[in-house]
Structures are given as C-alpha cells and as structure tokens.
Amino acid sequence: MILHVACLPFPTHQGTQAAIASMLDASTRAGRPVHLLAYAHAAYELDAPYEIHRIPNFPEVRSVRSGPSWGKLALDARCIVEIRRLASRLQPIAIIAHHIEAALAALAARVAPVYYVAHTSLERELPVFMSRVPARPVRSIGRRLEKQVCRRAEGVAAVAPALATLLGESVRYLPVPWSRSAVSDRATRSEARLALGIAPDAEVCLYAGNLDPYQGWENLVEAIAMLRCSRRNAHLLIATASHPGPAREQAERLGVGSAVGFSGLESERARMLAHAASDVAWVPRRTEGGLPVKMLDAFARDLPVVAMQRATAGLPLRGACRIVSDDDPGALAAAAGSLFEDERAANALRDRAGRYLSVHHSSEWFSTALRHLLGDGVASAPARHGVPPPRAASALQVD
C-alpha cells in the first residue's frame, strides 16, 4: 500500500487537488491500493474509490484558498503526527508527498521512503503570495527548502516538464492523467447560454479558475477591453470559486463591466455550463512552474485554448493550443479574435487537443512514469484486483 500525503484541504476547486485526485483514481484503476491523508476540511463531498484519512478538525483554520498562513503551519505539524499514526496501522511501503508542505511533514515523520511530487515551484510562487516582503529573501527561502526536500527524498517528480527543469536534473516528469472520456455530461451552447444569461450572439472567452495572484487573471480583463474595440459582442466569462470583487472592480475601472460576467464552479454542472457557453478558453499564468489543470480540462471539454507561453509549462503541446506571449493582453485579444473569425482553425485546435490528451495524459503513461519514479522495489508490489472503477476526472471541481 502507498500512502499519499497532501497538506491541504481536499477536495477543493483548485487544480492541485484535482490533479492529486486524478492520480489516485488512475492508481486505483490499475489495482494499486492507495490511501490519502489530507486536512479535515473540504470544499465539497467526493465519493472517492480510495480511503481518505483526515487530521483532526481545527475550526479556526478552515480556508480552502491557496497560499501560506500561520494556521496552516499548525495543520502541517499535526500531519506529522497523523502520518506516524497511519503508518503504524497501514504499514505503507512508500509515501508519495504532494507539494512541499507534505514532503516536509513526511520526511519529519520518518516512517517510510518518501517520494516528493512537486506541483509548483516554491521559489517562484512564494514571493507572489508574500508581495509585501522583499522578493529576494523569500525566493531564497523557497529555493533552500526545495533543495533540502529534493536531496532527502527517495525520488522527486514534477507535474510539468518546466517545473522538473526548475527543480534540477534528477527530477522526473510525472504527467497528470486526464482525458476527454472523463467528461460525461454536456450541454449545447444555446442551453448553456440560456442558463447563464449570456446573449446568443456573444463571442465568449472563458477563464475558469481562481483569482489568486499567481494566475495573472488581470491580463484577461485588459484583453477583453481591447477585444471590444473591434468586436462589440466580445464577452469575458469568469467561472470561479473565488470572490469576484477584484475582477469586477477592474472591469468597471476599464469600462467593460457589462462585458464581464461571472459564474460559479460549485458543481460539475456549473463547470459544464461555463465551458459549453464559451467559444475560447484563455489560460494566463504569472509565475513559472505549475501546471494549469484548467487547460487540460478545457481540452477535455472540446474548447479551443489560447494560453500564455508560461502557462504551457513545457508540455509538448504541438499545436494543441494557440500560444501567445506572456503578460500580453493584446496578444490574448488578437488570438481569440482570430479564432472567432476562423472556425476551421478552432476545430483543428479541438482535434489536436484531444489527440494530445489521449497520448500524453493517459492513465497508462502516468502509471509508467510512476513506476519509474518509485523503482522496481515499490512498483513491483502486488496489485489489488477487483477494484471498483473510479469517478471521472470531470467530477472534480478544478481551477
């Protein structure tokens, strides 16, 4: 049995949680027994085909948002205790620690070999969350913690090729399994727009994600303002679990308040409607290192994607999406406008995205990469047969 540790609320609307759940689903499908340890709280209920263990509830620390806090440090410390308790009962042959906090906790517990799976670069992302502190010392702290964990872990992998490169030569790339077949329910564009109150003739750009600082979502509001100069029906739909206040204020400030709409991501139906109502998905990124799972989800839902170069995360996309310069609202607007004009080009992106997912994010590729990470001793442990099929990835509420 392998124990996965994630020092975070689970599940939530964030891409990291969705990626972890998809990995656990794929492992379960392959007949490998896995368990997960996470925080006590969650954003919604998940009928998972694997057992989820939780640390005791801390009522004063219930946030499901990303970013560091003193309260989360207390939760992470408690995770060390719970890892030791679970290890004495479950006897895991290995621990897979997702993100830096889980790796530090698992290494401190000293109960089984620890394999670190990085979901972002602490060196690059921490300064964004701690913007009031000088960036250089914050980056230095993040870099030292990452190097310490990579040195002490039995093996290290990253969910994106660019992140693996940032972390060092010995770091492997571990693809997140994701597929078109995971999306079961679909709505027509007219049904979705009627449900969301969007005009039938609108040209809709979608951002489906949180409004945390590392996302760079501010570029999208500027992009829709530029696009409206030539395309009066252009509309930005922000589907988010975050408070929409900052985005709404920016839209009003730029004079495009009526062109920016909001919807939730509280259910699979909400996610399905947002994608079905849209013509193009915009995927920004302010920091290097992470994997924008929202891009994989748009691929799976047949929505052509315009992504910043930084957001491609070093993936071998080979024409699966339209790639534009980083932090360039004008480039985002121009790319979306060209896809509105050329339906054949949009359809070609959909087709190539589907083929990309089927090859590069298949459960088989993930399982092979995981075996290489764990090595022969762990990977050759007996599989468990007769495992029920996991829930589809589309049931995960992902930013």
Image: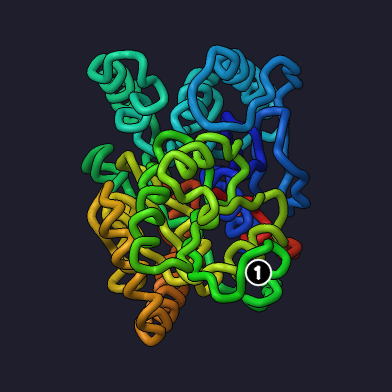
**Residue type for callout 1:** Arg
Q: Is residue 13 left or right of residue 324?
A: right
Compare residues 371 and 233 and report the one nearer the observer.
233
Q: Which of 8 and 274 lies nearest the eye of the viewer? A: 274
Say what secondary structure mark 1 lies in. helix
Left or right: residue 141 versus residue 272 is left
Residue ID at (67%, 74%): 186
Residue identified by numbered label 1: 193
Q: Position of residue 302 (x, y in %)?
A: 51, 74
Q: Say whether residue 16 is left or right of residue 392.
A: left
Residue 387 in the image: x percent, y percent? Answer: 73, 61
**In this orientation, does residue 349 appear?**
yes
Which residue is pictured at 59% across the width and 56% down the height? Answer: 27
Q: Nearer the viewer, residue 27 or 133?
A: 133
Residue at x-position 60% and y-position 14%: 71
Query: Horizontal and vertical percent for residue 124?
Result: 30, 32
Up/down of 247 relative to 329, above or below:
above
